[in-house]
Amino acid sequence: MSESTKATPASRQQLILQQVARGGSVRVEELAAKLGVSEMTVYRDIAELEKSDLVQLNRKEITAAESSLIEASARLRIATNAATKNEISRLSRQFLRSGMSVALDDSSTNLPLVENLESLAPLTVITNAEFLAQRVRQQKGVRLILLGGTYEAWADSYFGDLTELAVSQLNIDLCIMSATAINHGYCFHPDQQVTKFKRTLLAASRRKILVADASKFRRSALFKVGPLSDFDAAIVDRDTPDWAHTELKDSGLEVLVAE
């Protein structure tokens, strides 16, 4: 790591988030060696990340601030599995057609999808995610419908009754959505408010695509979004277990694998 990167707290903190996201946990001494800084510097960076509820520290081990009851923040999710998300988005793009309306939930998997949509113009993008809207606003020929409601900083997105009311007034061609956990033939999410929004978005959409990397099939979450059979197709990565492929296909979904 270069000296300039060492001296930038934001760069170090981003790398810490990436290490935690990839491995699930990382030790302070490992980070110090990788970053080329003292353990005290690592502790200071961790303290800043803890203030934002991004990570938690326990006996020199750093883990993501996420459980079956708490979803990871948008910042942490965006830093996770970037290469896999790029490939999943490449496959998602084949479902887009000029002139259609496409709804995207606040999944970070959809982030690469909204880059360079001008080639598909005219296109209407509907989302509750501010971090997606920021990338859509400046694209010519791409109309943005940003669903209002109550802004939740941890997700950088809008939720609540007003958001769901706005969705209920729409007739959407295509919805591309992820889930925190997928098992036993259902999609789950740890937050009840987000779960309600996802259900509303699915109900307003004619065709539904589920996007999920292998990690989604190893997690649990509290609230049931709905059955896999609500979706028409699923895009997964090559590390997705065989049982998950079987479950998706048995639910009637077309399954595409991002290599």
Image: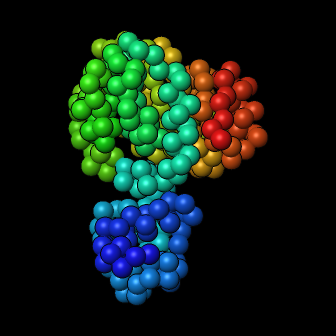
Is residue 23 or residue 199 the one in the foreground?
Answer: 23
Could you tell whether 79 is left or right of 232 in the image?
left
Q: Residue at point 50% right, 60% down? A: 21
Quadrant holding the C terminus = top right
Quadrant holding the N terminus = bottom left
**Is residue 113 visible to the viewer in this orientation of the structure?**
yes
Could you tell whether 215 is left or right of 105 in the image?
right
Q: Position of residue 137 (x, y in %)?
A: 24, 32
Q: Position of residue 167 (x, y in %)?
A: 32, 21
Q: Residue at point 52% right, 21% down? A: 95
Could you tell whether 155 is left or right of 149 in the image?
right
Q: Residue at point 37% right, 32% down? A: 116
Q: Position of residue 5 (x, y in %)?
A: 36, 73
Which of the 4 image quadrants contains residue 101?
top left
Q: Residue at point 43% right, 43% down? A: 108
Q: Position of residue 17 (x, y in %)?
A: 43, 63
Q: Is residue 74 above or below residue 177?
A: below
- Colour pattern of the rendering: rainbow
**Is residue 70 visible to the viewer in this orientation of the structure?**
no
Q: Is residue 62 above or below residue 205?
A: below
Q: Is residue 105 above or below residue 22?
A: above
Q: How many marks?
A: 0
Which of the 4 image quadrants contains residue 47?
bottom left
